[in-house]
């Protein structure tokens, strides 16, 4: 799955959109993400930013 985290820009065709870092992290942990596009500023600092996804993402080799 191509995962798109953004609160404002339109979703590119073929990508699955989420609005919050927790949703993106959950999909990454499930192992279903093949590509990732992250917006840094999501408009609600209490819910996190794109960087939080990278900081919490499971590491793969």
Image (tube, helix red, strand yellow):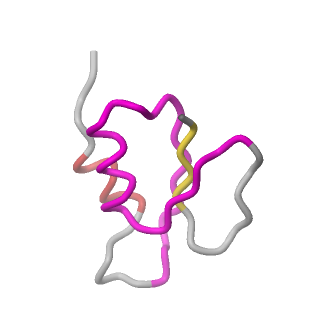
Q: In this view, does 55 lie to the left or right of 42?
A: left
Provide residue 1's location: percent of width, then percent of height.
53, 34
| Residue at 31%, 50% in the rendered image | 25
Provide residue 37's location: percent of width, then percent of height.
56, 47
| Residue at 56%, 65% in the rendered image | 6
Q: In this view, does 31 lie to the left or right of 14?
A: left
Provide residue 3's location: percent of width, then percent of height.
53, 45
Q: In which quarter of the image is residue 2?
A: top right
| Residue at 32%, 77% in the rendered image | 47
Name the one closer to the observer, 39 or 14.
14
Q: Report the magenta residues as a range.
A: 14-43
Q: Quadrant of residue 44?
A: bottom left
Above or below residue 47? Residue 3 is: above
| Residue at 77%, 46% in the rendered image | 13
Name the one closer to the observer, 1 or 48.
1
Name the one closer to the observer, 19 or 48.
19
Q: Given the current orientation, which residue lies at the most extreme top position?
A: 61
Name the one closer to the observer, 57 or 40.
57
Q: In which quarter of the image is the C terminus?
A: top left
Tell whether position 39 is magenta: yes
């Amino acid at each position: 799955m191509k995962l798109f985290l953004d609160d404002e820009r339109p979703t590119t065709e073929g990508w699955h959109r989420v609005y919050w870092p927790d949703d993106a992290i959950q999909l990454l942990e499930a192992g279903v993400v093949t590509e990732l596009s992250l917006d840094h500023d999501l408009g609600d600092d209490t819910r996190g930013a794109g960087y939080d996804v990278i900081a919490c993402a499971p590491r793969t080799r």
